[in-house]
Image (cartoon, rainbow, N blue to C red):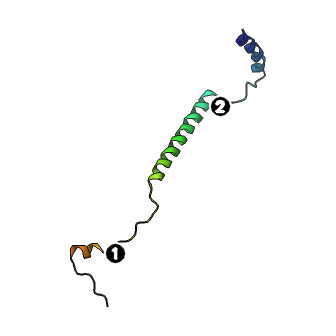
Amino acid sequence: MSASLALTHLVPLADEIDKDKVTPGVLGFIVFAVMALAVWGLMKSMNRHMSKVDFQETPERETTQADVSGKASPAKG
């Protein structure tokens, strides 16, 4: 009973809405919700990828590949 009572009170309010006014409606809500979910998914993916990044620079090796392979290194002088 209370649902029908609530509807009888809402029907006069629906007549007060301007029929010439354009509103986004259900389609606008669906598009906005899909875009919000896409942004949320991209942010989660970005956080996951950024956590894998190592910001520490690796130290340079003192011995070069040429020294390891046995080739002559340039003379110091």
Q: Residue at x 48, y 45 (%)?
A: 45
Please name the residue shown 44% across and 58% down the image. 54
Q: Nearer the viewer, residue 72 or 18?
A: 72
What element does badge 2 sit on?
A: loop
Could you tell me which residue is drawn at 38 percent across and 71 percent down?
60
Q: CA distance from mark 1 to mark 2?
A: 65 Å
Please give the count of numbered marks on the rendered protein: 2
- 46 over 70 or under it: above or below: above
Which residue in the structure is indicated by mark 2? 24
Residue ID for mark 1:
62
Q: Amino acid at mark 2?
A: Pro
- In front of the other: label 1 or label 2? 1
Q: Residue at x 34, y 75 (%)?
A: 62
In the displayed structure, 8 sits above or below 30; it is above
Query: Residue 4: horizontal and vertical position, in percent?
Result: 72, 10
Could you tell me residue 14's position as x and y percent?
75, 20
